[in-house]
Amino acid sequence: MPGKNLPEIANEPCRRCKENSAALVVRTEPLCRDCFVKYVHTKAIKRLESFRVRNAAPDHHRKILLALSSGVSSAALLHILDHHLKTQKTKTGRTGFALSVVFVGAPDVNFQAEELLAKARDHYPDHEYASLPLYDIFCLVSDDASLLALIRPLGAAPDLPPAEKLAQLINSLTSATARADVISTIRTRLIVEHAKSIGCEGILWGDSTTKLAEKTLAETAKGRGFSLPWQVADGESPFGITFHYPLRDVLKKELVSYVKLAEPSLASIVHASSVPTQASMSSKNTTIDDLMKQYFESVEENFPSIVSNVVRTTSKLEAASVSASDPYCDLCNMPVPAGRFGIHGWGGDQKDGVDGCNKEGLDLCYGCTRSIPQLAIDTNGNP
Amino acid sequence: MPPNPCASCKTNRALILRPKDHSKLCKGCFIDVFEAEIHHTITANKLFYRGEKIAIGASGGKDSTVLASVLKTLNERYDYGVELILLSIDEGIKGYRDDSLETVKRNAQQYNMPLTILGYDELYGWTMDQVVEQVGKKGNCTYCGVFRRQALDRGAARLGVKHVVTGHNADDVAETVLMNLLRADLPRLSRTTSIVTSTPSASLDPNSHTNIKRSKPLKYAYEKEIVLYAHHKNLDYFSTECIYSPEAFRGSARALIKNLERIRPSAILDVVRSGEDMAKLVPGSDEGCGGACGNAVPAGEEEEGGCGSANGRTAGGDMANMEQHLAQNEAAAENGLEVEITSRHINDTHDSSVPLPAGKKGKKNKGPSSTQRKTTKQVMGQCKRCGYLSSQDICKACVLLEGLNKNRPKNKIEVGYEDGQETEKELNSVTNGLNKLHVEGG
Ligand SMILES: [Zn+2]
Ligand SMILES: [Zn+2]
């Protein structure tokens, strides 16, 4: 924690303003509360240069979507953006963009999403809000034929209510890793579809440096290396909408401090994360995401610059050039260069056999194929 | 049918839970599928050609022993028509190689393959014991690592062999992928994922050791399956587990791989696949042409740095050194200072650090998508002395040898070990965390 040495630094002056006494140490620099808040704001706003007031045509209001998740980072981002827009308004009489906020409830959340969103709306009333259940994916995706194909082999009737469809899909997955993977994949898709449907030109994700590093290694471990640039880099996504990660230069632990120091009410829109404690890690319910989360939260403690360096460097990977003829994965919707679907037919698995999924008329990328069970044809009897 | 039939032959009783996909197989089918996959790796990648002479880098350990055994079996079964020989390196550390070299000697008889053991004294004129005597225990790891990197190539060149195969397995490759992500070393990430690393050279001397092709036929084989195969085939190998803990980056990556395998057995393979896919996305990568052109780098570069003595090394040193250097860069960039990259450590890790813009607010940002897309690309040339591929005029081995031969210890290579104690503490917190993370086998 940046504030761990509080007693020791209590008498030290802030290194920036040289006036107030330091409230915490940020990357070896003792800072007071105000200078720390400014530090976090500057890092985030610097990433939003393209949304400055002067870039906004007076007659056309730009709209961007913020994906709120009940975590510390996206809550902090909402607070920063709200403050930023108010400042723009005061200074220029208008804002560079309008903000729309979306919250996606996951099937595994056990807290009151509506309550959380209501509080956010109370505190930051200037923006548009929406709360979507995850199963809305079956309503929002225009050609949901491919998604339906995922559950058809499970015996799902096409006229099943969306909530039931989602439940069937999730219940068919055989591991905690697969469930977490598919849920986050669907969540991303749902947010993209929502953003497009309400006319947003881009999506702001709350991911901190630490989270992006976690994602880098977790997606690599899940066989999604081919789509990594589309998952961590700022700019054009393959979905016809831009992605932005304004908190990419702020560490998770810094955001935890920010939420405590910046505004007392912020904590009310954060739901304590339910990461399994190290003691409760068992192979049954541990996911690859959990593993990387724990790893990077420990690295962040003593090696914060290494975490930043991983993210900075990974963002230099150049996304594969996508041509219009490149096919897309039916689940994650990522372009699959040269149509390399499935897990067979490469150096590491030379079976020429047609993938079970293809038999069902599904095209799944390598990573999605790993998560979606091989349906009926799997004779290996995985537990 | 037996109560628990093999998933493949459906006849025999399944005795083996295959580590790669948890399928239940009988002993015979496991051995068949293990060999079939390696055969496929060899043919699909056209690793060998008829009449080729191939040196197996043999340490007496499980990987190279299984490699020798499988290659012999496949060469006979499928008539590859290749000539296989064993090549072992003796670092010249008294007692260190005795048992493993005895194992290799027995392997040579068991597989009826010619064996050559080359000592550091023959290759470099110095045994490691003599190096330690000269430079002391502190700095000798650098020598060991650099010498080892070139030893197989130099040895092969002496034997007139153009192709060296090594026992690197899927776990090693996956570990290296994660390690290079952690070290943020994209060029190396892209190199070490390819199955063949050749070192084409401009050298006119056909016997030069820079023309050696390296390949990893076990690239997709799980370590656990290699152990199982050795066990069920009753292979004679020597456990050469390094007793010294690896440096922090590699140690972290190794712990992650072990945990990943517990969570999802396919994860090792999935990391390898991601590594291959990401190699194509590395700026300036030559993957498009199969890695055969231009991107020439000493093939043995991914060779493990482990050596017979860890005395000169602090656990966590590499991570702590890099952290310190990066933090300085960040601070300097924050203050708008020019950053000169002088750290020795950075020379070691090549382009691991990102050149930072000199000015702070001065640079016009062209929007979020226009991050600096520049990776420093190493310019590889040849060592003026020995012809080995090197980014410097004189390769590291020759620099070190020169120092040794001048009878003058090179102190500068010991930089950075002073704050070892504190580092160790920090590192322990990371590795302890990881150890606690050990998930119960499923
Ligand atoms: Zn201050
Ligand atoms: Zn996919």
Image: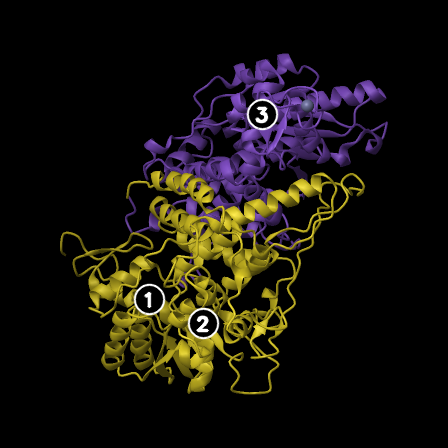
Chain colours: A purple, B yellow
Q: Is mark 3 within 8 Å of ligand 1?
A: no
Q: Is residue B177 above or below residue A298?
A: below
Give the amino acid type for the residue marked by disc 3 in the picture. Leu
Q: Is mark 1 within 8 Å of ligand 2?
A: no
Badge 1 local density, few (<14 within 10 Å), some, or many (20+)?
Answer: many
Q: Which residue is mark 1?
A: B63
Q: Residue at x 24, y 64 (%)?
A: B29
Closer to the eye: label 3 or 1: 3
Q: Residue at x 47, y 46 (%)?
A: A368
In the rendered image, residue B127, in percent from the top left (x then y), is placed at 40, 74
Q: Secondary structure at mark 3?
A: strand
Q: Is residue A138 above or below residue B126?
A: above
Looking at the image, do the residues carrying marks 3 and 1 touch, with CB atoms under 8 Å apart? Answer: no
Q: Which mark is residue B406?
A: none
Q: What is the quadrant of the N terminus of chain B in the image?
A: bottom left
Q: Secondary structure at mark 1?
A: helix
Distance from Cα at disc 2 to Cα at disc 1: 14 Å
Q: Is residue A30 above or below residue B146?
A: above
Name the one closer to the observer, B387 or B415.
Answer: B415
Q: Residue furthest left?
A: B2
Badge 2 local density, few (<14 within 10 Å), some, or many (20+)?
Answer: many
Q: Which residue is mark 2?
A: B215
Q: Residue at x 32, y 37 (%)?
A: A282
In this orientation, does residue B280 appear? no
Pointer 2 chain:
B
Q: Is mark 2 within 8 Å of ligand 2?
A: no
